[in-house]
Image: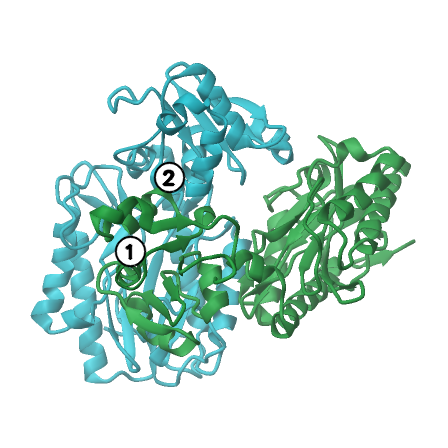
Chain colours: A green, B cyan
Amino acid sequence: MANEGVEALLVTHLPDVRWLCGFSGSNAALAVTERQAVLFTDGRYTAQAREETRGARVVIAKRSALKEACALLAERVRHAAFDPAHTTVADLGLMRSVVKAKVRRSFFEPLQAPMVSDLRMVKDAGELAAMEGAAKLGCRLFEEIVPHMQSGHTETALAAELEYRARSLGAEGMSFETIVAAGPRSALPHGRATTARLPRNGFVTLDFGVILKGYCSDMTRTVHMGRASREERAAYDAVLEAQQAAVNAVKPGATCGEVDEAARSVLRRTGWARYFTHSTGHGVGLEIHESPRIAARQEMKLEPGMTITIEPGVYLPGRFGIRIEDMVAVTATGHRVLTPVTKDWIEIHSGEGRARAKR
Amino acid sequence: MANEGVEALLVTHLPDVRWLCGFSGSNAALAVTERQAVLFTDGRYTAQAREETRGARVVIAKRSALKEACALLAERVRHAAFDPAHTTVADLGLMRSVVKAKVRRSFFEPLQAPMVSDLRMVKDAGELAAMEGAAKLGCRLFEEIVPHMQSGHTETALAAELEYRARSLGAEGMSFETIVAAGPRSALPHGRATTARLPRNGFVTLDFGVILKGYCSDMTRTVHMGRASREERAAYDAVLEAQQAAVNAVKPGATCGEVDEAARSVLRRTGWARYFTHSTGHGVGLEIHESPRIAARQEMKLEPGMTITIEPGVYLPGRFGIRIEDMVAVTATGHRVLTPVTKDWIEIHSGEGRARAKR
């Protein structure tokens, strides 16, 4: 805060609150001054706040946690910074309503650059262990679910099986709505599971993650049901090569744009670039989407401890799509892939009751 | 819009976008003028946007859906309204950045009262059917899960079983993180499932909901494992009486505050009011928490088509808690309970392998 010239900070984005003081409830405002941090929540969380919170005093607000946090700041400091990316215009109005009219417009100042989310990009050893645990659980789920894939089963049934196993193995929940995109639906980058059925012949994309100790995992694998065409196989090989090139580009000092370009250039060379319609990846941690963005022209440099996804894909509308995604941690010397399950071509022949992996 | 003196409206809150035009993707900005509605999203949603959107032209934005929506509005109208409760300070900056400098501060005006969320409070027949389906599925899940409750099982195992059945029966997902709060944890109003075990003797609160066709259900039942004390039974009877009194108070023209008071006055009379630490309920629909709030002093009047929860509870810290929750639709003449599963006392004696319901 001193570096940024900030006298006090109001934190209301819940993952930021959790990262700073441990409290994981759904209503919280954290007032941070040079000398003290005070967490405001409400009566539903009296016991939980005491149990979880570290490094901050806990106050159970009578009416509004947000307004009481602002009132405390107004008593103690002359200016307080807030995060404009996670503060609504309405909340800013509430925040200002507890400040004396004379300084109402000037008391709260938007942070000029993200502060807590930038700090959160670099994970410490405990966080990395939690994320590695979540990623490994994801890999185990993929290995367990492939033998269950049979043409005719619905996407939702497969998602149900996956999520049940996740929960049974201790996941606190899924880190986002499970994507099972079968046949032509694999061409939808965000094809949440529906009642569509796994095809006799075609791709199925599985994109899912679990939450362990609050931390998210995120991985994607695309498998083929039945015998693939040459074009399908060529597309898969191109995506895999692009994905591996981007993974290989992950190291301290590399820019996010360079990592994106590593994937994109493979797809340009192999002729699939026009079907790669999104960015290459994103940071992941307490939230499923965090900084940094792994996208074209992003100048941010990777640092040890950052944890990102690498997930290029190609999508041919109405026909098929392929995406392959790993979670990758930046290390002091390069990178470590947190999702060690195979990315090799997997072809599933129904009736056999199990998958055959062929290369 | 004409009634509110609004020339154009920018809609960015995703449930509002979905309610207005059907699009359910995760990136959207809807620009509405007197003559036209235009939906902006990105390349990931090309196919989905075409398939889902009704009553709006679809534009796939090259860079930012939000900024392109604002640019269109800036060309066509002199002022556009936005929803301050769902627009961040940072997004307002982005929105303004595409408007000519001369009118930058004045072009976007915050809505003085919620517009789309107020419209969304009253459900039409199709929405009510979706919600009734979701609520019925919830009831079926409760009936199926009770025979699975055995002391020693973990809360997460029970949640896993419940969620697996929900998915298998066609739910698109759970409408919020499933609450299974066992023994002393039942005193936590928001006790998400943990690895704590169902007690030999004590309450277990189940609070959960499913999503069907985009619409949420929400219900709570509290059952007792083993033989209850007189105090526990008295508390249950008081909560049930309070809950029923509030349900009975639901009718067109009643204020939300009156419904809250109906529950609260029963708990005052029976001596439990000090342990009822939250409000009585909330609207539910595309979102799990919507307007109106069913809380003390809320003057809003109920109207036919509104769908709300009625969920009083009592919580004795460190000892036990009880909550009973139904979803209730306001009808032309009164109300209809959408969660018809029993609220009678249920006592589970482990080892018998099934629940006995006693009154």
Q: What's the residue at 15%, 60% (across, down)? A: B263
Q: Does residue A264 appear left or right of residue B73 in this picture? A: right
Q: Amino acid at mark 2?
A: Ala
- Residue B166 appears at what percent x and percent y? 50, 56
Q: Residues within 10 Å of mark 1 (few under 14, many from 20)?
A: many
Q: In which quarter of the view is residue B103 placed?
A: top left
Q: CA distance from mark 1 to mark 2?
A: 16 Å
What SS does tag 1 mark?
A: strand
Q: Chain of mark 2?
A: B
Front residue of this view, candidates A211 and B335 = A211
Q: List the single residue furthest toward the left.
A: B269
Q: Is residue A206 above or below residue B13?
A: below
Q: Is residue A182 above or below residue A249?
A: above
Front residue of this view, candidates B64 and A341 = B64
Front residue of this view, candidates B45 and A260 = A260
What SS does tag 2 mark?
A: helix
Q: Would you say residue A300 is visible in this rendering?
A: yes
- Residue B105 appears at what percent x and percent y? 37, 29
* Upstream in sequence: badge 1 or badge 2: 2
Mark sitting on residue B326: 1
- The residue tagged 2 is B129
Q: Is residue A193 above or below residue B163?
A: above
